[in-house]
Image (cartoon, rainbow, N blue to C red):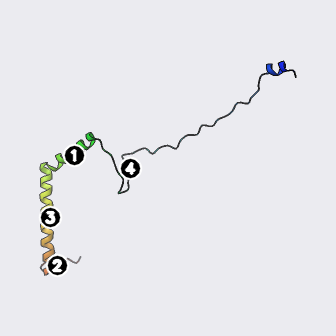
Amino acid sequence: MSKKEAIQEPIQEQPKVVKAVSAPEAPVYDPSKKYSWDNNAKFELTGHQFGLWLNSVRAKVSSPEAGEFHLAFESSAVIESIMAAGVKSGVIVELKE
């Protein structure tokens, strides 16, 4: 084969097949599921997010219902201490079913 013929011959290459490799899918948050995290996990909030959270908590804590709940909680603590003292003194006895 002459040099001229070698130059004119088309190069016959087989096409290369490249298989696409997909990255593993990242987990997607589903609010209907329960999640957990490490006690040392750190979360970052923007000023706006923190303000929204803080104002929501303040609104709940300052509501009339929260005041009633707090009063009921304190009353429950008083009754529990009276019950404990009564059981200790024998005035209140355990009910056997």
Total label count? Answer: 4
Who's the residue at 55% across and 40% down the image? Answer: 22
User: Closer to the camera, 88 or 94?
Assistant: 88
Question: Disc 1 or 4, which lies upstream in sequence?
Answer: 4
Q: Do residues under tags 3 and 1 come within 8 Å of each other at their CB atoms?
A: no
Residue 26's mark? none
According to the picture, the residue beneath numbered tag 2 turns out to be: 93
Q: Image quarter for residue 50?
A: top left
Q: Nearer the viewer, mark 2 or mark 3?
A: 3
Specify whether 28 is left or right of 70.
right
Specify whether 19 is left or right of 41.
right
Q: CA distance from mark 2 to mark 4?
A: 44 Å
Q: Mark 1: give few (<14), some (14-19) or many (20+) Cα within 10 Å.
A: few
Q: Do residues under tags 4 and 3 come within 8 Å of each other at their CB atoms?
A: no
Residue 33's mark? 4
Question: Disc 2 or 4, which lies upstream in sequence?
Answer: 4
Question: Disc 4 or 3, which lies upstream in sequence?
Answer: 4
The amino acid at mark 3 is: Ser
Q: Mark 2: give few (<14), some (14-19) or many (20+) Cα within 10 Å.
A: few
Residue 54's mark? 1
According to the picture, the residue beneath numbered tag 3 turns out to be: 76
The amino acid at mark 1 is: Leu
